[in-house]
Structures are given as C-alpha cells and as structure tokens.
Amino acid sequence: MRLEVGVTEAPVLLRAIEAMNHAASAVGEVAIHEKAKHRTRLHHLTYRMVRERFGLSAQMAIRVIGKVGGAVPYDPRILSWKGKQRERVSLLTLDGRREFRVRWSEYGRQALSRGKLRGEANLVYRDGTFYLALVVESYDSPCYEPTGGLGVDLGVVNNATDSDGAVHSSGPVEKVRVKADRLKARLQRAGTRSAHRHLQRAGRRESSFRRQTNHCISKSIVARAEGTKRAVALEDLGGIRERTTVRRSQRRRHLSWSFAQLRSSVEYNAAAKRVPVILVDPRNTSRTCPSCGTIDKKNRPTRDEFRCVSCGLAGPADRIVAGSEGTWGHGSDLSYKPPSSIGGR
C-alpha cells in the first residue's frame, strides 16, 4: 500500500523513520553488550535512553524496543484509519499526528475484502516512496467440485502454456533480465558506494517486474479455470534444477526460472477464488499423449513439436503436454494440493 506524501510532509516521516532506526540500533547495541535476550529486561535497560536521546513518544519507544529492525513498526495506538474505505491513515510522528492519503493496489483491496487487518504495520521508505506493509488475515472457503482439469505446462521459453492453448511467453521477462545483467556487470566493475546502491535498486526492479508478470499470468490461469469450473493442474517441479542439466550459455536463464514463484502465485489466486489446484507427478508428462495415453520418447521429435506414434495426435508440444497434465497424468501419482491460507501484505 503506497502513501501519497507531499513534499513538505516527506521530511516529517523521514525524521520519524531515522529516529526510530537510530534508536533501534542503539537498543541493539545495548542488547549485545548486556546480553539482554528478554524483552522485559531490555525495556528496563533502554526505555529512558530511547525517549530522552531520540525524542520518541512512549508508545514509539515501546515499539522500537519490542522490535529492533530496519522498518518502523506502527501499532493501533499510533496508527488509525480514516474513512469507510480507509482512504486516509493517521500516523504519529515526532511532530505530532499527521494524516496521509492512501493509494491501495488492486491486490491490497482484494486481500482486505476477504479478511481483516491483523497486528501492526511497518512504515518503509524505499526508492523515494513510502509504503505501509500490512498483514491481512483471511480464511479458507471450501473449493467447488471440479468438472475437469486445466493443465498448465511451466517452462523456460514459455512461462506457462495451458491446455486451452493460451501461451504466456517468457520473452518480456528475459529481455528485462538480460538488460539488468548488463547493468549489474557495469556497476560491479565500478565498485563505488553509489554503484552499490544503484545495483540494489536494479535488482529490486527486475524482481518486481518478474513478480508482477507471474501475478498477471496466474490471475489469467485461475480466471480461465474458474470460468469453466475446472481445477488447475500443475507439474510438481520441486528439485528440477538439481535433476536437469543445461548448456553453459543457458545456465543464467535456467537459474533465474521462477517456476516456484509462479506456482505460489497460482495457489494464492486460486485460494481466493476457491479453485482447486492439483499437483501432477512430472514423470513422462512431456512424452505422454493425452488422447490415447501412449508414452514414448518418439512422441517428441523436437522440443517444440509433439506427434503421437500411436494415434497420430500432433501439435505444439507445450499445449499437448499441458493437456496431458489436465488429465492428471494417465496413471501418474495424483497429489491434491488444497488452497493455502490467504495472507497478504
């Protein structure tokens, strides 16, 4: 959740963040020096020092001592929401209470509509923007009974291909990765402090783009399955990097393959829509004909082509493999994955 902060208000929040972070560092030093592992003892050792030295309010001092870290923690005593739709938020700063307009993301709105805010929020300042990191607690609803399966083949060339023929290419993500790798190489050669900061920002931008792309792909897959009351059938690719080898020129791309993140995103979005998710044993799915069940290496004359040696079914390999997964593997071990609990930030 992003805050809309004016030019004159930004220094107020920055002062609060800096003061609380400096206070947290001081508390951490005392904890190490005095070997104070318990919160109560640490409170007695540092409370007065934190208030006098850093000018924090009583509750701010308590929160800093309770959580020594980089983000600034806000609990309900120093944070309150305004408006029926939580359009504004009131935060306690060193200069008193200040109100800020809230810019909710679609993801945040959906998460909040399914549950309730839980616990404290963390005020974070990153790349010139203020954020509030929230925890939303939601509860699982029973899934509908599926009428079939929407098979989804995960890959490196195509992030995902489903059995209906929808293809999600990895081209845009790969283009961003190559550009980011070149920039990182130049920054690493420079070795300056400024280059190091720029390097961190570049890494975050690449990760953010990859995560957003996977989120959009997963929403599309889940929406297609929900619209036809089918389950989503995914290969269980855990440990695939250890089981496969690639050419040296392809190692970087293979290592950056974010299939686990995409699967997690599918499971999250499926849980929100009550769509069942099926994990299919990946053995032989790439060479199994979804029409007649024939398993043969010759079914895949090339990486991109499938041609069944028994019934003659032919077409793009990724789509046909997804169809095989949609039938849950023709005798492969069936592993049902119930939707995970929904918790978001």
Image (cartoon, rainbow, N blue to C red):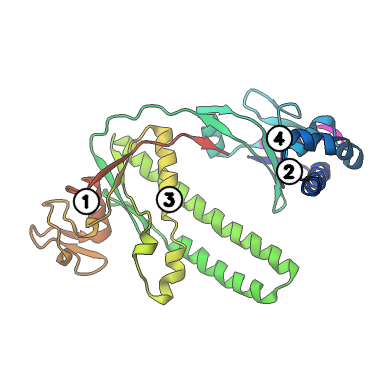
Quadrant containing the N terminus is: top right
Q: Which of the two labelled residues, at mark 1 and mark 2, occupies the earlier sequence position?
A: 2
Amino acid of disc 4: Arg
Disc 1 is placed on an element classified as helix
Q: Can you tell which mark lies on residue 306? A: none
Q: Mark 1 sits on what residue? A: 324
Which callout, 3 or 1, points at the residue further toward the start of the chain?
3
Whole-angstrom CA distance, mark 3 to mark 2, is 33 Å
Nearest to N terminus: mark 4 or mark 3: 4
Residue 230 position, x and y percent, is 28, 37
| Circle nearer the N terminus (2, 4) | 2
Crowd class of label 3 (few under 14; some 14 to 19; many from 20; radius 10 Å): many
Q: Are marks 3 and 1 in contact (CB under 8 Å)?
A: no
Graded by Cα atoms within 10 Å as few (under 14), some (14 to 19) or many (20 or more), the crowding at tag 1 reads many
Quarter occupied by the C terminus: top right
- Between the residue at mark 1 and the residue at mark 2, the CA separation in whole angstroms equals 51 Å
Displayed quadrant of residue 69? top right
Task: Please name the residue shown 43% across and 37% down the image.
Answer: 340
**Whether residue 233 can be seen here:** yes
Q: Tell me where residue 318 appears, x and y as whole percent.
A: 27, 58
The disc placed on residue 101 is 4
Q: Main secondary structure of the magenta part?
A: strand
Type of the residue with mark 2: Val
Label 2 sits on residue: 68
